[in-house]
Image (cartoon, helix red, strand yellow):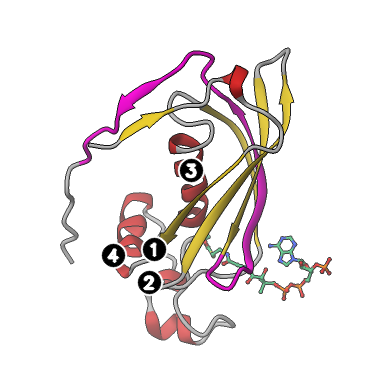
Amino acid sequence: MRQLENIPFEELTVGQTDSLTRTLTEEDLLLFAKVSGDTNPVHLDKAFAATTQFEGRIAHGMWTSSLISCALATRLPGPGGIYLSQEVKFMRPVKIGDTVTVKLEVLDINERRKRATVSTNVVNQDGKTVVKGKAEIMPAVEKVVVDEYPLPEVELKA
Ligand SMILES: C[C@@H](O)CC(=O)SCCNC(=O)CCNC(=O)[C@H](O)C(C)(C)COP(=O)(O)OP(=O)(O)OC[C@H]1O[C@@H](n2cnc3c(N)ncnc32)[C@H](O)[C@@H]1OP(=O)(O)O
């Protein structure tokens, strides 16, 4: 089982970086539509999506954004951190089979409020930015070391 360990607030420094990479599968796209209820045909309907400027299905913007949450929760600052705000600009589409990398960098630390601003850009396999933005977070003050929570296997039934 994977262990998750945080970077407590006092150990965060401006310029610290981390990243997380994920490839979008069709199953991910369908599961995201199911849990979010976002059944926009641009994500699901091949025939409809082919008629758009993207010429095919594209990922939910919030799927890509959810990877930012994952990176913050598991990498920098890690478990126990709390999301306060998130700015996202969807610059380019993500398609099934694309491999995207969330790049985190600590931009600013507010010692008084024990909060940090982190840039949260996401690039694709060609190094092109697909999401631009930044987040404000409240990292845990104490050291947190936990076994990653065991998620159940879920089966997608059509
Ligand atoms: C509701 C849900 O179900 C729907 C979804 O989830 S859809 C999935 C998420 N969204 C996307 O995948 C869209 C991705 N974005 C794009 O593909 C492009 O932004 C665009 C094709 C919609 C527009 O791009 P482009 O044609 O390059 O833009 P313009 O020519 O209109 O403007 C050029 C300048 O604007 C800047 N820019 C482009 N996109 C954004 C953005 N999302 N936010 C802010 N600014 C943006 C671009 O950098 C140019 O700036 P410059 O200073 O002039 O260089």
Residues under labels 2 and 1: Cα distance? 7 Å
Estimate the spatial distance between the alpha carbons at disc 1 and disc 3, rounded to whole Å: 25 Å
Residue lying at 53% horizontally and 70% vertically, measured from the top left: 125
Amino acid type for the residue under numbered disc 3: Ala
Q: How far apart are labels 4 and 1 at the CA level? A: 14 Å
Residue 120 place in picture, x, y as percent: 62, 47
Pick whichever of labels 4 and 3 is earlier in the sequence.
Answer: 4
The residues bearing labels 4 and 2 have C-alpha atoms spaced at a distance of 11 Å
Q: Is residue 135 inside the magenta stretch?
A: yes
Position of 126 with respect to 40 (left or right) is right
What is the spatial separation of the Cα atoms under label 2 and label 3, in whole angstroms? 26 Å
Give the extent of the magenta segment.
Answer: 124-151
Residue 6 is one of the magenta-drawn residues: no
| Mark 2, residue position | 44
Asked whether the residues under the numbered discs 2 and 1 touch, taking CB atoms below 8 Å apart as contact, a structural biologist would say: yes
Mark linked to residue 39: 1
Pinpoint residue 100: horizontal percent, then vertical percent: 50, 62
Q: How far apart are the alpha carbons under marks 4 and 3?
A: 20 Å
